[in-house]
Amino acid sequence: MPNYAVIDLGSNSIRLVVYEVRNDKKRAYTNKDFRSLINDKVMAGLAAYVEDGVFTKAGVKRAVSVLKGHLKRSKYFQCKRVDVFATAVLRNASNCDEAIAAIEKDTGLPVTLLSARDEAHLGFVGATCDRAIERGTLIDIGGGSTELTRIEGGKQRDNVSLGQGSLSSYAQFVKDILPTPEEAAAIREAFWKHVEALPNREAFRAETFYGIGGTARAAAKMYAQTHGEGVRPKTLSPEQVRDILALRRQNASAYAHSALKASAERIHTLTPGCLILESLLTGLGATKLEICKYGVREGYLIERMLG
């Protein structure tokens, strides 16, 4: 069975996933057709290397260093193909082309830059590889952006990218590790301005939201940690997300210790991510968020590599 490696060069982390594919000659794939052999994440924090809209040489150096490590690990699996894709951190940089060219030169691998529409579409492909979604809104809160996809009749109808994510929120508004009440309010206000600027905001209103990506999973882990549950819940309500944020206001020390246990590498981005998540769920009328196991990387594997 052939192995395929996907490297996701994101705003917050750079992740390598090696998939074993049972049969790469099929015309359609579900989650039963592949399994991950290794899932290796490095919290590179590339969004912090953007200065005045420019992705710096230090950022390129950091990205190259992590990518070379991932490439070295992928060689143990004798992969049939290794692909690198990048999202908002490079997409939104004013020197995007130059930064990608420098990374490609030093790693020897081409970097596929996903547009906001690509990212939302591949997230939908991944999220639906293990389930059918008839209607709802798919959300992906990344480090540098937040993608929304409207699903109707089992198909994606609209998708938008909002230029604020968990890490960019932290970098712009938070001075220490946890945001103060004033900083939290600033994150909410700035994010909701992005939502209000949408020409079709009401199109994304739905009772059920579907969450892909690290922020949704980290929020579920945090809820389990703060409520003494051994297993991460598969769904979250707006009230449960508000419970997480309430603990931060009531007992910042207990909140910080719980965050370290739930998702240590996201302790600085967890709260901004939850603020964005709660704003979307409440503001767009959702009653629950279903946490999806698969997302953009699996969508990329299915459509760009196997398709």
Image (cartoon, grey):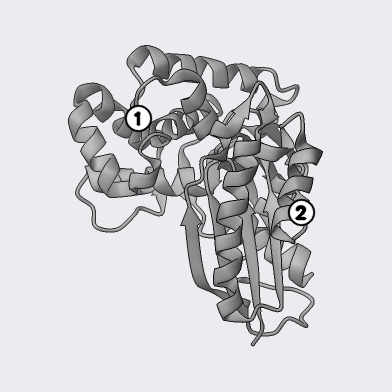
Q: Nearer the viewer, residue 102 or 95?
A: 102
**Could you say whether the residue bearing mark 2 is in a helix, strand or loop?**
helix
Quarter of image, res 148: top right
Can residue 285 be seen at all in this image of the molecule? no
Q: Nearer the viewer, residue 208 or 108?
A: 108
Instruction: Give the numbered dot on residue 242.
Output: 1
Label 1 packing within 10 angstroms: few (<14), some (14-19), many (20+):
some
Instruction: Give the numbered dot on residue 105.
Output: 2
Q: Residue at x 23, y 52 (%)?
A: 229
Q: Viewed as shown, does residue 232 lie left or right of 82?
A: left
Asked if 144 appears above or below 115 in the picture, the reply is: above
Q: Residue at x 72, y 32 (%)?
A: 93
Q: Nearer the viewer, residue 62 or 91?
A: 62
Which residue of the protein is positioned furthest toward the top in this rendering?
A: 182
Label 2 packing within 10 angstroms: few (<14), some (14-19), many (20+):
few
Q: Position of residue 272 (x, y in %)?
A: 44, 29
- Give the mark nearer the N terminus: 2 vs 1: 2
Task: Check disc 2 and give the amino acid type.
Answer: Lys
User: Are the residues tagged 2 and 1 within 8 Å (C-beta)?
Assistant: no
Quarter of image, res 23: bottom right
Locate the C terminus and report the quarter of the image it occupies: bottom right
Can residue 46 be seen at all in this image of the molecule? yes
Locate the N terminus and report the quarter of the image it occupies: bottom right
Q: Viewed as shown, does residue 229 lie left or right of 279?
A: left
Asked if 56 appears above or below 63 in the picture, the reply is: above
Q: Position of residue 215 (x, y in %)?
A: 47, 43
**Could you say whether the residue bearing mark 1 is in a helix, strand or loop?**
helix
Task: Check disc 1 and give the amino acid type.
Answer: Arg
Instruction: Give the numbered dot on residue 101.
Output: none
